[in-house]
Amino acid sequence: MNRPYNFSAGPAAIPAEVLEQAAAEMLDWHGSGMGVMEMSHRGKEFISIYEQAEADLRELLAVPAHFKILFMQGGGLAENAIVPLNLSHAGTVDFVLTGSWSQKSLKEARKYAAQAHVAASGESGQFTSLPPAASWELSRGASYLHICSNETIHGVEFHELPDLKALGSDAPLVIDFSSHVASRSVDWSRVGLAFGGAQKNIGPAGLTIVIVREDLLGHALPACPSAFDYKIVADNQSMFNTPPTWGIYIAGLTFQWLKRQREGELTGIAAMEQRNIAKAELLYRSIDQSQLYLNKVAPNCRSRMNIPFFLRNEALNDAFLTGAKERGLLQLKGHKSVGGMRASLYNAMPLAGVQALVDYLHAFEQQHA
């Protein structure tokens, strides 16, 4: 089946193999007589789905044993509140602002922490580069430092996570990795907690992944709802309340799909990372060599997942989007807050899709030269 190429920033494309398997199992999962959406979350059928998904994610991301994997709800926006409710100790938390999502996180944390301190910001440069770590003004005794390791809207990415110990801080590093989770490896020695909505690289909207170091559990503020207390969620294997069962199921199928991926001798996340590097380089090269298109992000921190670009003649924007849709290239309009175009190259986007976009970029430029 030939489908259009969906460049949506999220909810985003899901691998066709995953959708086909879910469709085949919709009415009857493995002879149980039930679809996954109809199962009790405490029944043996769903528990087996959950346990396999958790084990596969731990294997894929090489998550150490002293980290808990939680399947929660609410997306990244809810985690902006849930993280400070669990980790702030009603003290000071530090933020590095690199775009719209870290700004939202800061605003929410101010409701729960005694102080939400901006350690560094790229706003003066319109979030087109990352503030150098050496310039960060870290708070003494901060409860944690928060970064968004890939900004979906502005298209900047930390290709290497900061080493807070090297910066003289003992604060845990919290990362919002919603838009690059499972696209690259994670250095867990530098991370205290990572969270992400599933709707970009993992599955449908509604599921949130939280991976948290065990020593950070058990410190929730008294006002924290029980269903959002990480220790309670961990102690109940993500079953304290009814979890997003369908989202966990699709995530599990996606994890199995990821484990099957190969690039030469590489498999799983390592294979996906090489593939994602190749896809991003192909599109950035086409944009940089063009006289019509422009990407404003500094080359050393360009996102591999979300590539914003602009037409130098913005009067051509509507014609560009119309022509793209006619070619089966969907969801290329940029976020309303920044305008322009955006191509999201998540794991489910094949190299052929990026090549089709590059071919269209060339053809459209020649037509309107």
Image (cartoon, grey):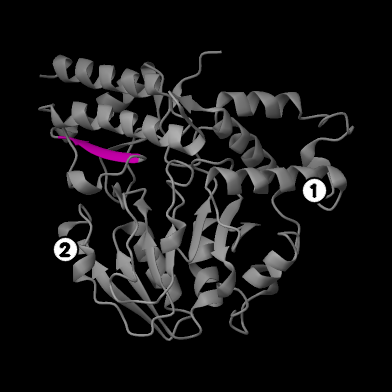
Tag 2: amino acid: Ser
Q: Quadrant of residue 226?
A: bottom right
The circle drawn on residue 124 is 2
Rendering coords of residue 24 (x, y %): 74, 23
Residue toward you, 205 or 334: 205
Task: Name the dominant secondary structure of the magenta segment.
Answer: strand
Region rendered in magenta: 306-311
Answer with left or right where residue 277 lies relative to residue 368. right
Q: Name the residue at 69% across, 66% down.
A: 233
* 238 is higher (above) or lower (below) than 362: below
Answer with left or right where residue 314 lies relative to residue 119. left
Q: Name the residue at 48% across, 30% down.
A: 348
Numbered disc in front, either 2 or 1: 1
- Distance, label 2 to label 1, CA atoms, is 49 Å
Q: Earlier in the sequence, mark 2 or mark 1?
A: 1
The circle drawn on residue 47 is 1
Tag 1: amino acid: Ile
Q: Is residue 325 magenta?
A: no
Q: Quadrant of residue 105?
A: bottom left
Q: Does the rendering let one see residue 17? A: yes
Specify few, some or many for label 1: CA neighbours under 10 Å numbering under 14, 14-19, or 20 or more.
some
Which quadrant would the N terminus be assigned to in this image? top right
Q: Name the residue at 49% across, 85% down.
A: 90
* 139 is higher (above) or lower (below) than 269: below
Q: Is residue 308 magenta?
A: yes
